[in-house]
Image: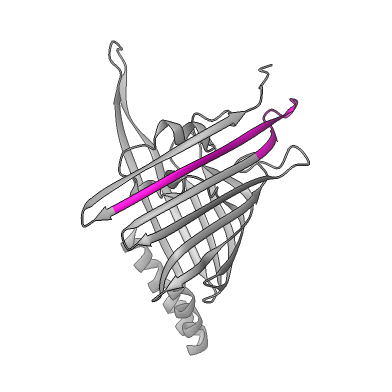
Amino acid sequence: MKNKFQILYFILLISASAAGQTADSTILTVLKRVKLAGFTQVRFQHTLNSKQDGVDIPRARLDLKYATSQKWEYHLQVDFGGSSVKLLDATIGHTFSREFSLLTGQFKIPFSLENVASDANLDFINRAQVVEAMVARSRDITGNQNGRDIGLQISGSIIRMNDTSLVDYYAAVVNGQGINIADANLYKDFAGRIVLHPLKRLSVGGSVYSGYDRIFFFGPNVVRNRFGGEISWSWKDLVLQGEYIHGKDGMVIIY
């Protein structure tokens, strides 16, 4: 990827030089504001008492960020792994100050410590089963939405000391239907998360989710409520963390 990017940059630079120094300067400025990243995970699976095993690619991510200034940023992330290509993140963000930022589009629901963590930075291969079942992932009744939804989010650091954040907050209003899906009813879901940093290496937080969604297009609206707590402590290469999540869903009728 690095070599291809350098070749592309070289071609663009030659084209810009033919047009003059103004075009050349513009391209250099644009490239400095672009952040391109990605990762791939290869998995081997074997089931006991089964004659089948194999290698697959559960995740193959391409992540693109473009900042037009220190205030505005555009984010696009696509997953090519699994059985189909999925658009994961597609957001426009504006930072008014450290205390207040606005994000709109498709993004991770601000609920749970493990849900908002990047797949590339997980301590284990997969997330905990409770996170998979409660936060719009593989075991959730809404289907695997990769912990994301479409909506509007505000966030920031409301208390700071010596240029260090003591309280971070996240609050979002989302459709409640998942990724790449329009809302199926007139209601919106709320998700909120607050994280305290009483010590340099210690974080303590809590999350809440309140929803009333139509799980199936032709079905009734059902309650989807969750709350949870989290704690994380690190020292050099040692990390201790855990979280508790409680959820309550309404009766879902399978047609």
Vertical arrangement, residue 233 with respect to residue 161, above or below: above
Q: Is residue 182 left or right of residue 45?
A: right
Task: Residue at the far left: name it.
Answer: 237
Q: Quadrant of the N terminus?
A: bottom left
User: Is residue 213 highlighted in magenta?
Assistant: yes
Q: Position of residue 200 (x, y in %)?
A: 32, 63
Task: Residue at the far top: name it.
Answer: 49
Q: Position of residue 98 (x, y in %)?
A: 52, 72
Vertical arrangement, residue 27 with respect to residue 223, above or below: below
Residue 127 visible, this orientation: yes
User: Is residue 18 highlighted in magenta?
Assistant: no
* Residue sitting at x 42%, y 46%: 230
* Residue sitting at x 40%, y 60%: 197
Q: Main secondary structure of the magenta part?
A: strand
Q: Position of residue 255 (x, y in %)?
A: 69, 16
Is 72 or 197 nearer to us in this picture? 197
Residue 146 visible, this orientation: no
* Residue sitting at x 27%, y 54%: 234
Q: Position of residue 225 (x, y in %)?
A: 61, 36
Name the image colouring.
Answer: one colour
Task: Residue at the far right: name it.
Answer: 186
Q: Is residue 190 left or right of residue 164?
A: right
Task: Residue at the far bottom: name it.
Answer: 21
What segment is highlighted magenta in the picture? 211-233
